[in-house]
Amino acid sequence: MQTPIPLSLYDLTCEQLAHQLAEWGEPAFRARQVWHWLYQRLASSIDEMTDLPRPLRDRLKQTYVLGRMTLVTEQHSSDGWTRKWLFRLADGSEIETVLMEYDGLRRTACVSSQAGCAMGCSFCATGQMGFLRNLRSGEIVEQALWAARALRDKTHGNERLSNLVLMGMGEPFANYNNVMEAARRLMTPEHEGGFGLGARKITLSTVGLVAGIRRFAEEAAQINLAVSLHAATDALRDQLVPINRRYPLRELTAATRDYLRKTNRRVSYEWALIDGVNDTVEQARALVELVRQTNPRAGVNLVHVNLIPLNPTSGYDGHASRRARIHRFRDVLTQADIPNTLRIRRGIDINAGCGQLKAKTAQTGLENQTGG
Ligand code: SAH
Ligand code: SF4
């Protein structure tokens, strides 16, 4: 689609905004004022910014838009703790955002980094739909602010978004600059009028783009890293995660080890448990070995394994592992002293898995309906 994408205020860094306002002859404090409306008041329109002089508001509106996403569908899980939105962007492409409130005190937004994804993981609904385009930094920011606003309104201002995960549609390291820009913008401290999200509250999940992991290791940011492993032998990973043919496990674990060595942080390996495919004792043992290879020093473990029973998708035959097999798999990890968590995907009734709402809407033509 060729529709040009208008420039949004969310695309601007604080410096760019200040520069623009200075060019218009505005006093220096205006940038902070606008930033405050965007990131603390969570304004949903430029008209809301009532303490700006009217001519400035008009000029902002002539030059920028605020939001560029229109809501297509909103769904609530039956337990009420997960909300999922499908948005249409200015050029017609569609993305998903999820808000999760079930995890203790955490209030987590899961945002997309691309419309679609080029990585083609066989079990993933986003992979099955292919790649459309990279999101702009402002489109990533806008999803986080949407979730923050929805949470604020639902709780009458009592609750704030506490965590952000880049685990929606797309591969964050395939859109590296825009993702990091968006993260930095959301991390602007509160005393500077910003949203004030701590780097340690952000988690970025990669399919294993080695070049991205190496670049990420050089950033001084404290953002958490998750690596979607799903298989511990190249033969199996080649099938599930085709990018493994380009970045095989030996290179992936070496890059992850170098990241750990350099940053002294932790990493999590993500593993979607697929019945009879990657939930075997052999795979669990191979995973133990990979974790050993990943750790930079003997006797210290910096790797956590997150196990997620597969969310079924229409383009893939596999099923979630059964309970007994999950137990057996976990036992192998636990006996090897590898910390692991079984993540039960809440919101499964609203297809709150990667790319799944979009896929379902495309199938059924369902639009503008609420409810799971
Ligand atoms: N592209 C990145 C981040 C988005 S996907 C990545 O692959 O890491 C977020 C997570 O959801 C990844 O761990 C991915 O493997 C997982 N995932 C995708 N489809 C899934 C499914 N059908 N069931 C369970 N997990 C899935
Ligand atoms: Fe892309 Fe991640 Fe889905 Fe793989 S799992 S297709 S990398 S979004």
Image (cartoon, rainbow, N blue to C red):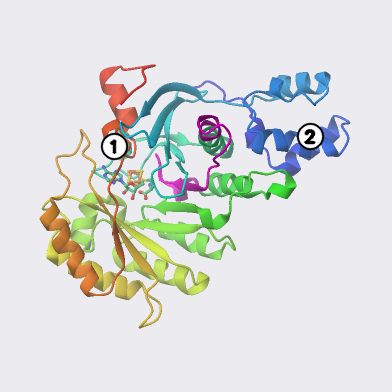
Residue annotated with mark 1: 125
Q: CA distance from mark 2 to mark 1?
A: 41 Å
For residue 83, the mark is none
Q: Give residue 231's quadrant in the image.
A: bottom left
Identify which residue, 141 or 22, lies in the foreground. 141
Q: Residue at x 39, y 48 (%)?
A: 103
Q: Is residue 210 above or below residue 30?
A: below
Label 1 beta carbon within 8 A of ligand 1: yes
**Residue 321 spot, x, y in % from top left:** 15, 50
Identify which residue, 173 or 44, lies in the foreground. 44
Q: Amino acid at mark 2?
A: Gln
Q: Secondary structure at mark 2?
A: helix
Q: Residue at x 52, y 25 (%)?
A: 69
Is 366 colored magenta in this rendering?
no
Residue annotated with mark 2: 20
Q: Residue at x 48, y 63 (%)?
A: 214
Query: Is residue 309 visible to us here?
Result: yes
**Residue 137 spot, x, y in % from top left:** 57, 40
Is 163 colored magenta in this rendering?
yes
Q: Secondary structure at mark 1?
A: helix
Query: Is residue 1 visible to us here?
Result: no
For the record, the magenta segment spans 149-175
Horizontal relation, residue 264 to residue 221: left or right: left
Horizontal relation, residue 59 to residue 229: left or right: right
